[in-house]
Image: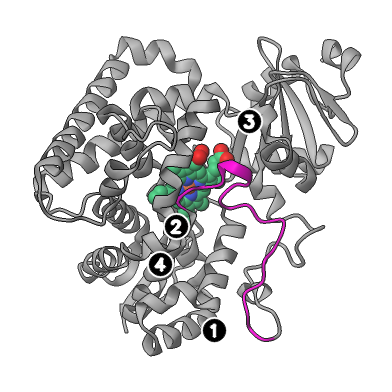
Amino acid sequence: MTTYKNKYRIPDGYSTTRLIIRSLLFLRRNSVRAISLNMDKFGDAYSAIFPGDKLIIVTQDLGFIQHVLRDNHTNYRKSEFTTAKVGRLFGKGLLFSNGDYWLRQRRLIQPGFHTRKLQELYKLMTETIEGAMAEWPTGNEIDVYPLIYQLAFDVILRSLFDIDLKPAKKKEMSLLFNQMQDFVVKDVNRPLRQLFYRITRQDKINLKRSERMRDIIREIIRQRRQDKREYADLLDMLLSARYEDTGEAMSEDQIIDEVLVLLLAGHETTANTLSWMLSLLADQPAVTDRLKAIAESTHIYDSVRNDYINAVINEAMRLRPAAFMTDRVAITDDHYGPWTFPKGTVVLSFFYGLHRHEDHWQHADIFLPERWLDDAGKLRKMFAFFPFGAGPRLCIGNNFAMAEMCFFTHAFFRRYNISSTGHVPNMLPLITLRPDKIFISMSPV
Ligand code: HEM
């Protein structure tokens, strides 16, 4: 701490010794709660110096977050800690790359996510959602998280590959994916267990799973190249994209990397948001009645532009942002407001705290979809709101996710009544903000 304090003006916070004592005392404490308490103590930014003299600044200050993610983004890259660990199994697609390689890939893939292009996927998405929901159980205590998690996986899988995947193959993909994801979550959250993972060969087992997953995707790509039918799925978009400078397509391995990233980034975040949304709605009969009335009187495709449905989803993402925090590393020394800090500093943007900040939100802790609507009931833009990040690395799938979540909400409230069981779900802030279980009471309309 003193070395940094002598040369830089870093926010107050924790020295390495204090951190070690705290981590011994609070092993496995909920990080969202811990960070929120630290914000109460230190203000909207604090520092922590990890062993090895690693400086981390955590902030929920709107200007600081905009500085890092948007205004001075060229001075920041994603931290290697998460990207290297996750990238080892899930490849080096958009989410895990940096610098020129990332920019080239982003430019190549971005057009595939424009709203007009996405409309070609609406049919696939709504069919998958309605098909999955038709099989759902009803009852007094249904844990909706696993149901929604599987549904979100099916939606992204079908949007990537508009083919009749054999049920056994789909099951294998889903299982491999979940196993790899569970391992990565443990690996990122418990880095001290490295040796244990090596001894128990979990490392190798998961690398093998990743290879198997890549082989399955490779086989699908090769079959597609021989297929004469026209497709409008995401795989078709990846196969037909051409680099501006060379006019060439991506290599097979690059396509597999991007497919894996879209599968990974494109389902757990959506599943978490929708599950949190239902838990927030379970004791809001006035809101669910309004959603039911909308679902009964409109076509499912119109839900994407429905202001009230969008307001409800936004409010759920405000209170329970699936991406509750994101990390960046300063490439050169930088400063913001009163702070100066050296290159290599990791800056964590804490969206969860920003979304509940009383400077920006009235009755910040209350679920209030109406806050998103102006007097005429039109959806408003809010500025301290970054569920999809900000700047050039803004979520590429944000329109896809919003469409999927609107379709889900429409289809769900057309089919089901819900009410609260009194169960309060636990937040599991792992890589994303997951609920442990979401028990709600569900009955057919
Ligand atoms: C509610 C759902 C979603 C949420 C909350 C969410 C959130 C985010 C956030 C916050 C980022 C930026 C991370 C950072 O700045 O470090 C991001 C990036 C990304 N998201 Fe999403 N996302 C969602 C759904 C999706 C979907 C459905 C897809 C794909 C179909 C997707 C694909 C991606 C990709 C590829 C990136 C990396 C973009 C880049 O670095 O250029 N996301 N997402």
Q: Which residue is mark 3?
A: 328
Q: Secondary structure at mark 3?
A: strand
**Would you identify the image quadrant in which residue 108 lies?**
top left
Task: Tell me which label, 2 or 4, sits earlier in the chain.
Answer: 2
Q: Which stretch appears magenta? A: 376-397
Would you name the residue on which mark 2 appears? 114
Residue 243 colored magenta?
A: no
Q: Is 29 located above or below residue 265 in the figure?
A: above
Q: Earlier in the sequence, mark 2 or mark 1?
A: 2
Q: Residue 286, labelled with which disc?
A: 1
**Residue on which disc 4 sits:** 440
Q: Nearer the viewer, mark 1 or mark 3?
A: 3
Earlier in the chain: of badge 1 and badge 3, it is 1
Give the residue type that dot 4 points to: Ile
Give the CA separation, mark 3 to mark 2.
Answer: 26 Å
Look at the image and tell me whether residue 87 can be seen.
Answer: yes
